[in-house]
Image (cartoon, grey):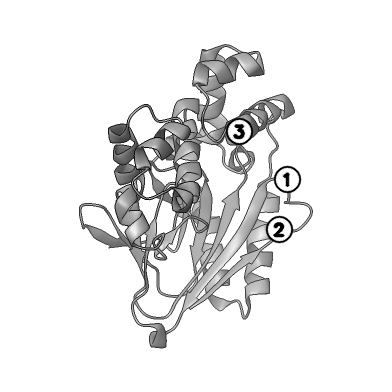
Amino acid sequence: MHFQIIQPSPSLAPYIRHFWVLETTLSDGIVKERVVPTGNIEMMFHYRKPFLSISPSGNSEAQSLSMISGISHSWFDVSTTGESGALAVTFLPGAAACFFNLPMMELEDKSLHLGDLFTHEANLIEEQMAEAPSTAERVRIVEDFLIQRLRPVPAHDIRLVQHGVQLIKKQKGQIRASELSEKLCVTPRTLERKFATFVGNTPKKFINIVRFHEVMTSLTSAKPGKLAQHALENGYFDQAHFIRDFKTYSGYTPKELLAGHFCPDLSQDIGHL
């Protein structure tokens, strides 16, 4: 299996966190990954056999050759089915709205075939990606596609949501949505509307995802038998809420996560596969 992170060109760096590439061969067998919510909006292209997406209920379906995925609030599994190859774009918070003419909240818990938004262009880029001889060429194809569709939104809106996201991450998700609106000097309703349009989530839901990631990242440092204390230190008022969030977002309880040695099959960087 080959996994690679690629930085965007300078012209797209203000909008894209990174590209990632995942390839498998027949010798790798079936590769299965657990994917948890990341707070990212992603666009992905399959140039070989698409992955299977498996829901918590066990239902599976092949992913589209090209797709745009919004912020999710639950885990799911993905599985390769032979020779697979995918290239994805992970957008910075608020930045995907500069390329797609729709409120990002419409993508919440969804993955749309790119053809639903760009019928002719999607068919063309799918063909180009399948025929491209290298990863560098595929990145160029995707960057050209994005540059042609770049329509910057009002700068003050992007500054507002990006500042909001920075505050949430600085506080490690331990901030209320009402506090956030006060710090940003806007009404709670205005902040919720801006987050829905540009980030793709309400401030409260985004805060919860950030807090989950912070807790999960620091979980291995928790002392045995001290999970309740760890929960309190990370903004949870009781252990039951702490465990429920973990089960919702990752499919594991905190103890199961620790017993699995931080679950090497659990993917945070990949986001929406």
Q: Secondary structure at mark 3?
A: helix
Direction from residue 217 to residue 75 in the image, left or right: left
Type of amino acid under label 1? Pro
- Label drawn at residue 87: none
Position of the C terminus by quadrant: bottom left
**Residue 166 in the figure: left or right of residue 54:** right
Position of residue 229 relative to residue 29, above or below, is above
Q: Is residue 76 above or below residue 154?
A: below
User: Counting other residues with Cα less than 10 Å from the Cα at mark 1, is it few (<14), some (14-19), or many (20 or more)?
Assistant: few
Q: Residue at x 70, y 37 (%)?
A: 152
Discs 1, 3 touching: Cβ within 8 Å? no
Cβ atoms under marks 2 and 3 closer than 8 Å: no
- The mark found on residue 8 in the picture is 2
Instruction: Tell me the residue that label 1 is attached to.
Output: 14
Q: Farthest bottom residue?
A: 27
Compute the Cα span from label 1 to label 2. 9 Å
Q: Residue at x 50, y 35 (%)?
A: 200
Front position in the image: 43 or 174 = 174
**Residue at the farthest right position:** 10
CA gap between label 1 and label 3 equals 15 Å
**SS class, disc 1:** loop
Dot 2: element: loop
Toward which corner of the image does residue 258 lie, by quadrant?
A: bottom left
